[in-house]
Structures are given as structure tokens and as C-alpha cells.
Amino acid sequence: MTNPVLQINHLQKKFGHFQALKDITFDVHPGEVFGFIGPNGAGKSTTIRVLLGIIRASGGDATIFGQNVWSDSVSIHQRLAYVPGDVYLWPNLTGGEIIDLLLKMNGTTHSTKTDDLIKKFGLDPTKKARTYSKGNRQKVALIAAFSQDANFYIFDEPTSGLDPLNERIFQEAVLDLKARGKAVLLSSHILSEVERMCDRIGIIREGQIIETGSLAEMRHLTRTMVTVTLGDDFDVTTLAGTHGVTAGQHPHEWQFSVEDAQLSAVMNALAQHQVITLQSTPPTLEDLFMHYYTGKE
Amino acid sequence: MSRYGRTGQLIRLNLRRDRFRILMWIILLAALMTSVAWKFEGIYGTQSEIAAIKGTLASPGIVAMFGAFSFTGKVTTAEIFANEMLLFMALIQVVMNLALSVHATRYEEDLGITELVRAHAVGTAAPLAAAAVELVLINGFLGILYSLGLTAANMPGATIEGNWLIGLGLASTGLLFGVLGLLTAQLADHSSSATGLAYSLFGLSYLARMITDVQHPRLTWWSPLGWIEKLAPYNHPNWAPIWLSLLLALVLAELAVLANSHRDLGAGAITTRPGRRNASVFLRGPVSLIWRRQRNVIIGWIVGIIIFGIAYGTVFNTIADILKTNPTMQQVFGTAMVHEANHKVLLSFTSLLAIVMAAVAVIPGIQLILKLHSDETRGWLEALYARPLSRTRLLFSYVGTAFVTSTLAYIGGLAGIVVMGDASLKHVQDGISASEFWQGVWAQLPEIWVFLALSVLLVGCWPRLKAFSWFYLALGFISVYMGSLLKLPDWVKNLAPSGWMPRVPQHDVNWTTFSWMVALALVLVIIGWIGYRRRDLHMS
């Protein structure tokens, strides 16, 4: 296993009496896209700001490239790219000027890649930033980040203002980074995006990481949804190992969920009652998310 | 739905939204006016005191700052009061009106709030009309407070008519410039451009009244800001300026409505043009970024202050003519003495203006330093902060630009006075010499730096208290602008750095004071820097 790019150990942050971050621990490795999900106010952006050295941790530690995020921030930022969730741009500069300026401050310059990205995202770089919509402001930040040759990329809800076409371009660009062995931390609300791109996921709730792992690993923690149509009058509510049984819209149709450990026993029992159709769906990330947040299925 | 539908509801909303700033302005202005009036009999109560100040008020330097007034017959305490306070109060009231008017219209539009409001069953001109009514209410209320306050203070020589003339005169001048702000807010397509345009016109009116006051007071009628001087409330009460102000305000309001109905939401006649596709080679770091963003403001301030300096300089010739008021002097004392006396007058005039120039030159510097914090809270620094850029470099980019701007603005302004002044003189030897000029420069720079250093300290350590910078500068400015005329005690003048250095070039620079003031500025900057490196940044 390679050395992790980002290492966070029991990170804490207090604002006065308010404990914004209680216990954050996770790693991100090269060539990996790490999804960081959680509802508003759970502490995603606060974590990212600690990582950028904008605010100072009150406990625990965090390192990027093995360097301390607070005291070595300048040298870390040489090899880091960041796109904030709400992009604010200097209103009287044009998008083109801002992209170039941001690149220069990282010691790189406007390249053909930058031009490609401007074209792909469909940005008009001659407009003043005050006239840009939210999506266009995000494009400016994304173009600057993708044309930079960094080793670690942090995206904080980068696609909230983009249309589906641009969202697709974003996803392709991130997968390209991954293929080139870069590490990516992606905080997002768009769970389908996270599901499609992320190798591992960390779920945060009220300042605490409550689960990390790959989607496959997490699925084991929850139940498989089953929809079945039987050939006789068997009442599935009496069957052991099933949860949340409801009768379907059609006669003899049932819906319920089963824990993985009970799955084969339940299937054997059902097989006694002439299974006509059977559909099983693994939990989606959305189901997982709801599971962790509401405690319901 | 008519064009003015639901204006009433919007007025209530505006008043609620602005309640704190309105309250603050009203308390500040009414308290200033009433407390000075209250104290005035103690300052200029006796005939000998009045006679002494009467001469001072007639001197060109004071006329340039306070306006020209004619005294006839027996001068009363109230007349002196009107002379000293009218223009000064009008200036503050205009600043208040410009801030409120642009804030209530174009700024709301920039934020997208107007869009939200207009999506409801609200008339197209209702937000504008509501802002106009808000201004009428605030100015009117303030005017009534002034009049009642003056009546209560009951200065010797004050009349009921004069009191109301002052109150309503200030209210109508304030309203006029407030409506001007509404108009520029319709013409420009974002709030900072609207504010800039309004302030340019305000500055132009001030310059026009200053030059005409010193040379041909009759022509001051051509400047709307000069009308306030023509009220002559306690000697020849004249209501014409009020009618003129209200009439012009009405015309400007009509133009604003016209402009409003001919434009789209978010657009303006003066539009933001597209710009460069790529950054210039020059734009590459935090300093050049500040320059690129703020160059218009920085250049505007420096050029503006130089123009003010030049305008003040043009009156040198009028001031340095003692023979005009004292024709026998040459025969009695000889030519050399006359030149010496002229030189003395110019020195004292320049010393007074140097302090005012210094206070004005501090403003853009404080703005730049406080911008470091407002950029931080607006999220504009977030993009910068993710770059390999230390906080030290970021802080000193802003602070350095601020110090250079204020320093250049001050030197430019003083140079404007001296160069133009000397050029206008018939006898150059009467004028300010180069060494006296540099003395004037060195004497005021530490004061400027201390004010700026205080802002650095606040932004670095206690950014929530940053408004204190303005309060402190206002204290310093009022204590030097009004200090000697109001006979403020020395401890009040010494509260702010503007009072710490003796008046130069009238006196020599005190190098001990100079050294410890510079040291103080340095210490404040260093503490602010340490604080800025340690604290959390606040992002929206």
C-alpha cells in the first residue's frame, strides 16, 4: 500500500462552545477518489477548511503529503488544487484573467489544456465575473483546478450549479485524474455522482465520521430489498428473518427487506410457495444515507 | 397593478431593514448639531469673542473650508454658529444620504433581493419610490430634530425662522444628494460604480463652491452644495435655496424614474464591458491583484486629493495679499516686512490644510486594509488561500498597498497646494519653500501611519471591531477641522494622532514625536500581523 496523501486522525474543531468537529478520522490514497458525504451543517466544509489551513484544528492532527496542514500550508498548496462550494470571484476581473492569475500563483501558466477546458465547459472568458451565474463561477474555479498539475484535489460540492452536460464533463475529468494516480477528495450532495465515481466513502454526521469504506463494504451493513410474487396465499409477515413486510399492489405480491445473513434461509422458505417473479435490489447509496441519518430503512 | 403598487409595504420593509443604520446616523447628527448649539454661547457669548472669530471666519483659508458669509451690523452668537456649522453638517448629511440611497436601490439589486421582491405583485417603480420616500422621511425627521434642538438651545440671536431654515435647509440639501444617489444607481449597473459616480458629482459641487466662495461668492449659486450657505438664517433669512434644492431633487427623481422604466432589472445605461480573454503579464500575485481590482479607486483618490490640493493652491494669491486689507502697512514697515507677513499667513494656511489633507489621505488606506477582512468574509480570499501563499504575504500585500496609497495621496495633495499656490503668487519668495514642504510631509506621515496601523491591528486581531477605525478617524478629523473653532480642550485634540504633532510647516517637525509615532505604528502593525497569522479566517 502506498503512503496516504491525506491522513486525518481524531480531528476536532471548536467554535467557542460549539463543537463543530468531534472526531474525524480518514485517509485518502493516491489514485483514489474519496467521497465525503453528509447533510448540511454536518462539518464537511469545516473539515475542508481545516485541511486548507484556513482555520486551525483544536485537537487531533491532519497531514497532507506528510506535512502539517496548519504550519506547512504554503508548501502543501504548491501541489494542491481546490474548488470551493460557493465560488466568489473578484467582480471586476474577467473569468479569463482570474483563471490565469490563479494558475500563475501556483507557478504554472495558461496552457492548451486550459483552452480545451474553457471550450469543453463552454465558458466565455471575456465576461466580467460580476455578470457570471453560479454555474459559470464554478466553471472558472474548475477550469483553474483541472489545468493545474497537482497531486491532491479537493472539491467541495463542485457541481451544484452545473447543468447535466457540464456535470458529465466534470466526472470525466475526475476519472482522468484518478487514472493518472492523483488523489481526490470529493464532498458532494449528489449521491449518484459519488456512487459512480468514488472508490471509498466517508459519511459524516454531527461532526463525526460514522462510517468509512467502499460502497460494497457498506452494503453488507444494510439489507437487500426484495419484491416477490408467490403462487399461493402464503403470508410473508409470518416468515422469520424479514423486515418491513408490506403487501404489493398485485395479489400475492410482497415487498420486504432481508439482512444478508438471513438471505438463503428466506429464499429456501419462499421456494416452497411457487415463486413466480422475484426482484432483489442492493441498497443504493441513497438508501444507505437515509439509513445512517434517519435510522430507518 | 400600477407601477407604484405596494410601495407602502416596501417603505415599511426598508425602514425595518435599515433601522440600525438610520438610528445611528440620526443620533450622531442630531447630537452633534444640538450639543454644539448648546455649548456655543459659552464659546462665543461675548462681543469680544465674536469680534475675534469674525476676523478668522473672513480669512480665505476658513472661507475655503466653511464657505463665505456676509456679516452686516451687530454679529450675534447664532450667526457665528450658522457660519461654522452649516456646510460642515451638510457634508456629513450628504455622505449619509449617498450611503443610504445606493444601499437601498442598486446594492439590493446586486444582491438579487430586488429580483425576489419584483417577482411578487409589486410595481416596477415601487422599490425606487420606496427608497425615495425613505429618504424624505429620514431627512425630514432629522430636519425637524435640528430645528427643535436649536430652538431648545436658544442661542443669543437665534430666531424661530432661522432655526427652521437651518433644519429644513439641511434636510433639503441632504435629500437632493440622496436623490442624486438614486439617479446614479439607475444609471450605473452595479453599486460601487453608482457610489463612485455620485461621489464624483458631490466632489465637483464641493470644488465649485470652494473656488467661487474664495473668489466670487455670488457665483456659489451655481453649486447645489453652495445653496446651503445662502440661507443666511439669522441675518437675512432666505427660503429660496430650499425651494431650489427641492425643485432640483424633484427633477432628478423624475429622471431616475424615467431611467428606471427604460431599463431591465440588473442593467444600467453605463454597462460593464467585456474584458480581456487572458490576464496581462503584469497580473501575477496578490499585490497586482489588489491593484487590478482597486486601481480605479486608488488612482481616483490620489488624483482627487491632488485636484483638491491644486484648488486650495489657487487661493494663495488672494490670501497672501495683506496689503489689500492693510494698505498702509508697506509705508510703515517696509516691503520686506510685508513679504514676511504674507509668508506667515501662507504657512498657517498650509499647516491647517495639511492636517485636513492627511485625514482625507488616510481614508483610502483604511479602506484597503479593511478590505482584507471584507474579502475574507465574502469568500474572495478562499480561492487565494488555497494557493501557495502565506498569510504574511497576503496581509502585507494589502497593508503595503494601503500605506503607499495614503502616503502618495498625502504628498500629492500637499504638493498640489504648494506647487499651484507658489505658481499663483506674484512674489515667489512669499510662498512655501521646498524645505518647508518636506517638513510638512514628514510631520503628517506618522499620523497617517498610526491611523493605518490601528486598522491593521484590528483586522489582524479583532476584525469585528474594525468599524472603530472609522470612528477614530472621524474623531481625529472633527477635532482638527472643528477643534480650534469650537475651542475643544487639548485632551480631546490629543485623543487622536492628528493632535500629537505641532502644526507644521508653521512650526518645525518635532523629531522625538516623529520617532515614537513611527515606532507606535510599527508595533501596532507587528501585533496585527501576529494576530492575523494565528486566527481562524471567517468564510461565509
Image (cartoon, helix red, strand yellow):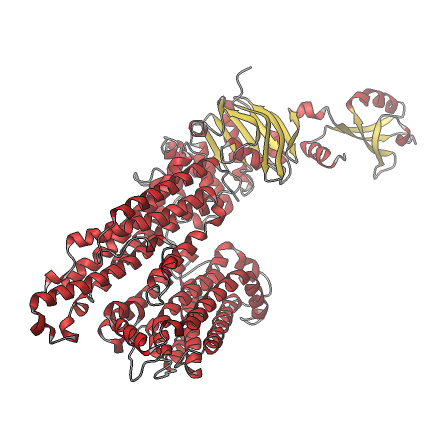
Residue B317 horizontal/vertical position (percent): 16, 67
Whether residue B264 is visible:
no
Q: Residue at x 34, y 83 (%)?
A: B235
Q: Residue at x 80, y 27 (%)?
A: A258
| A144 over B473 or under it: above or below | above
Number of numbered discs: 0
Q: Quadrant of residue A35?
A: top right
Position of B98 with respect to A188 (left or right) is: left
Position of A233 with respect to A205 (left or right) is: right
Q: Quadrant of residue B1?
A: bottom right
Residue A202 horizontal/vertical position (percent): 63, 29
Residue B489 horizontal/vertical position (percent): 37, 62
Which residue occupies the foreground of this view, B78 or B1? B78
| A103 over B167 or under it: above or below | above
| B347 over A206 or under it: above or below | below
Which residue occupies the foreground of this view, B6 or B215? B215
Whether residue B473 is visible:
yes
